[in-house]
Amino acid sequence: MGGVPQTSLTSPLVGREDELARLTGVLERARAGEARAVLVAGDAGVGKTRTLDEVAGRAAAAGTTVLTGHCVDLGDVGLPYLPFTEILGALAADERFAAVLAAHPVADRLLGGGPDDGGTADRSRLRLFEGVAALLTELADVAPLLLVLEDLHWADQSSRDLLRFLLSRGVLHRPAGGAPGHRLAVLASYRADDLHRRHPLRPLLAELVRLPSVERLELRPLPDADVARLVRSLRERPLPDTTVHRIVERAEGNAFYAEELVAATDTPAVGVPSGLADVLLIRFEQLSQTAQQVLRTAAVAGRRVGHDLLRDAVGLPEEELESALREAVERQLLVSGDGDTYSFRHALAREAVYADLLPGERARLHGGFARLLAGPDRRSDSAAERAHHYRESHDLPEALAASLEAADHAQRVGAPAEELRHVEAALDLWSAVDAAARPAGPDAVTLTLRASAAAAHAGEVHRAVSLTRSALAGLGQDADLELAARVRYTLAGNLLSVDNQSAAYAHSSEALGLIPAEPPSATWLWAAATHVMAARQVGENGTALSVARRALGVAEELGVTDARADLLISLTSLEGGNRSTPEGRERLLEARELARRAGNAPVELRALFNLAIGGFESGDLEECLTRASEGLDRARRSGLLSSPYPREMRYLRLLVQYTLGHWDECVRGSEEHSGTLPAWGGHTLGPGLYVALARGDAGAADRARALLKGPFDWMARLVGGIVLTDAAALRGDAADAVRSMRSTVEALSDDAGTPPLATVRLAALALSAVADTVVELRRTGDEAGAARWAETAAELVGQARASAGYGEDGTPQGPEGQAWLARAEAEWLRTAGSEPDPASWERTVAAFAFGDTYERARCRLRLAEALLAAGRREEAAAEAEAVCREADRLGATVLRERLDDLSRRGRLTDAAPAGGAGAAVLTARERDVLRLLALGHSNRRIGEELFISAKTASVHVSNILAKLHAAGRTEAVAIAYRQGLIVPEAAPSD
């Protein structure tokens, strides 16, 4: 397209000095190898794009490669990975990046040129995500890279998931060993005023801003003085002061409003419209009729449109089209971009033009775009756009067909959330389309079942339940019995995922009753397999065992190996050889192999999960780690990382890392997983909360409370209960600890009232606070109060004994459960009023030797305390020294503080050498603050250096003073020098 000028935004950037300085600082740090990301928020028109353009221009001038991707509003449908596809398209069009792109097939896949094998193994989302991350980091190795993502509020879920991955695990990850990181910065903008309470971007933003390399920058409305400067700078001839004042008043700090109001002063019309749309339309109406026609057509296409598509849609001769485009570009309504594309200068301009179309005109233009996109050269990734245009043109049969095609495409590229959205769009259209005009194949019930499967794969298990209930409601009186049974046992399986066991059992019973056992059928077989799981969950083990044995024979007779595998897994816990025994593991390995040969990934994942948790229950933590890793790898290859069993295996892997004392690895894993978890899988990061609590993170309890909000999630309730019970115990609030323990046990007990196996752990944690309270009450002479709490202690230890005495098959719990019982017994003995009993704590320390390093260290501190009370000082000092080493290694600041307190009270000074005590107590952030404090910086200066607020810096300074027992800042620095926490900085040489 020659003749149409390539223009950029030319309006001056007024104000924003602080924001530009901050963003420029981020770029400088990125060029030095410290990858960073900034989320730029602001209301529509406030200047986000203009600010980012300025930063991008400066970056490009400094030799940084700048790549920009835009998100587009397609209504209820989404085009997977659109901004990243745009970025890759720009790279593909530039010969400089040909070699890099050739080394990364992910580009071909997203651009639609890669092979389509029809499966999911080689198209898993994680592989796609890792491919994009590898491509970007390689580009950053060639030259500093700035990635700009605009309008995240319109991003499809796949793009949001990919961004989450890149920021939490991919491009911002700093190499080990202190090596420089990637020379990369990410700036992403979104409209803050578009984020309603349920907007899907809100939870992602909440996750991202907690990452250490991600910060948020809010562009607030400009001050009136800056708006006035902007208004005056837009005109060569001075505007009257009254006009400037009026524009400033009407703009209300919005730069875009101000620009458009200034542009509207050229019109002969009297006055200026009060609404933004009116302002935009005044400029639009100044164009020729042909240019208006072109802009109306472009508005229907979306924010950006290719030249060829626009030409075909508008139906003008080439010369007329070029003239109209030139006019629109020169009037700053359109901007020409790379690849013969045009975009509206502002999204709001496009929205105003679109809204001004007559209904019939709008439908006609949408229909034209739909037909053009459906031409002989149509791409599979255009189905979402076609569905949008067909729906808006009221061509419902074609919209239905395109929605289903878009769902198929989303499934192929590993975007289950988009698949769900497109299938649901098809369901919305289903009843409005005549039966004869519907695509051949599925009926509404079958389509609803597909939607429920996509929801489950996307991690939206409650949505999966809702959809399957809809499928059940859609069954007619004359419905096929096999379909009716399938709907019911699918609903039962989904209900088990959300811990609604009673309803699951009822529906699985109905499913089994609908299909006769004779002649044998696959439908009856899977109904039976689901019923076995449901029966076991409600305590109907006799029913579960008889049905499982009968169904196993049917599976062998029919040769349905994956159903046979599923039944073998269930029978492992029903026939005595549970998953923690060698016999149980052998059966689970057989089931895993059967499922693998049958190609049934969900059943194989169930086998691997049971192998993993069996290893944990038997105390074989390495076996647990191996099986969990195998399971997650299988889930990645099959595209099922968001499904329930991989979710639990993530938790198990992190739990093992926490238990073995690999805390930094656990924290890193939690941060990495946060990039790929569905919203309902937050409990998976529970071990990271355990670490945070032990390291003195005051926000750990708040994050645990957040897990308890929303629909009931059994594991989230467990994790939240453990953290909150332990947090209450650590702060010495026995009443709150007991309340938290009891409410958690009550919430997690099954329909028959059987408490969870974790009751022993919860009781032991609550008992520690109760025992402390009893000891203190006795010390102050309050025997009545001590007696009341001793009764509570007796109740709690009784619950612990009952819990540890049974497992899932009625046998005692394994090493972990017995260790927690030993701790509960030892804490209970402290309430009995007898002499100190070091032996009980020696037994507890030995019980935790199976691998739980932190709990073993906590019990050794109790042992040191008991030895000291018994007058065995040398042994107490030895135990204290061991606790000191472990607490320092783990960074367990709370444990170290308690050890220091015991050492001071008991004069066990050797256990806490002065040179290292403070360093162990201070967090990494507090050490950073201490270093700047030693340089004499104010709280404000410390905040600026560390990119935190002055108020937060003040909180850190107060914590440092308290931990170092210093009366003021000067004394704290002096103590820090004495203890070797900081060293004097060398004077600069002349």
Image (cartoon, grey):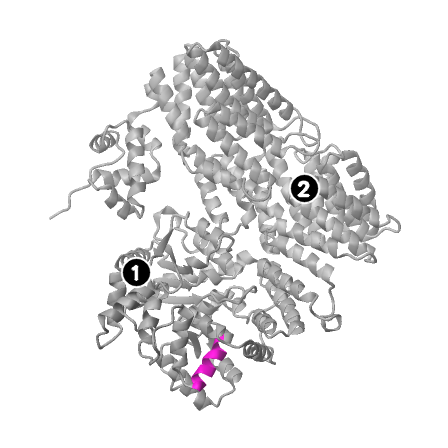
The residue that disc 1 covers is: 222
Q: Residue at x 43, y 77 (%)?
A: 342
Res. 29 visible in picture: yes
Q: Is residue 313 above or below residue 228?
A: below
- Left or right, 708 with respect to 504, comes to left
Name the mark on residue 60.
none
Residue 53 in percent (x, y) is at 34, 67
The residue that disc 2 covers is: 500
Mark 1, residues whose alpha carbon is within 10 Å: few (<14), some, or many (≥20)? many
Prevailing secondary structure class for the magenta stretch in the rendered image = helix
- Farthest front residue in view: 270
- Farthest left residue in view: 990
- Left or right, 253 with respect to 978, comes to right
Res. 594 visible in picture: no
Residue 959 in percent (x, y) is at 32, 33
Q: Nearer the viewer, residue 246 or 657?
A: 246
Marks 1 and 2 sit apart, C-alpha to C-alpha, by: 52 Å
Q: Nearer the viewer, residue 812 or 213?
A: 213
Say if the magenta span includes residue 777: no
Q: Nearer the viewer, residue 690 or 327?
A: 327
Q: Amino acid at mark 1?
A: Leu
Q: Mark 2 or mark 1, which is nearer the start of the sequence?
A: 1
Q: Amino acid at mark 2?
A: Asn
Residue 526 in percent (x, y) is at 77, 49
Q: Residue at x 62, y 25 (%)?
A: 804
Q: Residue 376's image quarter? A: bottom right
Mark 2, residues whose alpha carbon is within 10 Å: few (<14), some, or many (≥20)? many
Q: Is residue 214 above or below residue 7?
A: above
Q: From which residue to which does the magenta span run?
A: 289-299
Task: Locate the N terminus and report the quarter of the image it occupies.
Answer: bottom left
Q: Is residue 782 above or below residue 481?
A: above
